[in-house]
Image (spheres, rainbow, N blue to C red):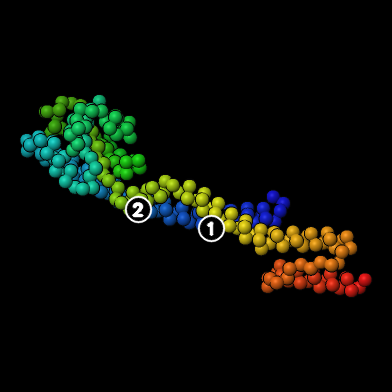
Amino acid sequence: MKSLKGKFLFFLFVSSIIIIGTPTLFLLNQLKSNFEQRSKYFLESTFDLFMNGLNNAMLIGQKDVQHELDYLAKNSNINNLRIFNEKGIIKYSIKKNELGKNILHIAPHHEDFNIIENKKLSVVPSKHIYSIAGSIRNQSKCKSCHGTSEIIAYIDLDANLTPYETNFSIFYNNIPYYATVIILMLIIGAYILFDYFISVPLKLFEKAIDILKLGNFNLQLPSRRKDEIGNLGRHFNLMVMELKNSK
């Protein structure tokens, strides 16, 4: 990278990443974290609400689990709510067509459901949802009905991303492409400007010197510009005139 143009473009590329890319990425990561935190609180509170409602219903002998799911389904932010067993078979769901199917076929992001012991929050960008999964523990007061197994079943709760979160998620996932296009546009624009205002005049100056070395004093450089390049052209023309008159 010996040319002035190459050094300039390299400096522009590095500067763009440091000055524009770094703070922009920090801001976007902060926004992403805020969105995820909001959804985490919503999902966890809804999950706990369902668990408490389910426990209370069981204690008073009202074992209509589907009724509890349908009640929560009235919340427009809820995308889906399922209960599945240790084999992954869906026993209850607010979407009746999922009953009897395997959770791994419906929601592949739960491939590790067998080791879910605590609540696990995940994001599924392709479906624009936040998902939380956890286990229904077999408490001492439940063992008369469910035996001695440690876990009775698993719960999967999915919430829709808000329109803002959906748009942000799409934008965030495409950042590398947007950044590449912006940096390329900056470099191309800088290349054109550098070439027009600096590179071309310098090449003319270099060519004029070569002609001057051959003894040809009948040349003049453009000197209409009011910047340093224009001053260089005027001084060069003055020098050529003085050399010509001294002959």
**Relative vertical location of residue 185 with respect to residue 47 in this rendering, above or below:** below
| Crowdedness near tag 1: few (<14), some (14–19) or many (≥20) residues, C-alpha within 10 Å | few
Q: Residue 244, image x and y in percent?
A: 88, 71
Query: In this image, 152 relative to 18: left or right?
Result: left
Q: Residue 3, image x and y in percent?
A: 71, 53
User: How many numbered callouts?
Assistant: 2
**Relative vertical location of residue 152 with respect to residue 182 in this rendering, above or below:** above
Q: Residue 106, image x and y in percent?
A: 28, 32
Give the residue displayed 19% in from the left and 47% down from the top: 75
Q: Secondary structure at mark 2?
A: helix
Q: Secondary structure at mark 1?
A: helix
Query: In this image, 92 relative to 131: left or right?
Result: left
Q: Which quadrant of the figure contains the C terminus?
A: bottom right
Residue type at mark 1: give it.
Ile
Q: Which residue is mark 1?
A: 19
Q: Depth check: give the residue in front, 132 or 74.
A: 74
Q: Residue 221: name its quadrant.
A: bottom right
Q: Which residue is mark 2?
A: 34
First along the sequence among labels 2 and 1: 1
Q: CA distance from mark 2 to mark 1?
A: 24 Å
Q: Depth check: give the residue in front, 210 or 102.
A: 210
Give the residue displayed 23% in from the left and 33% down from the top: 154
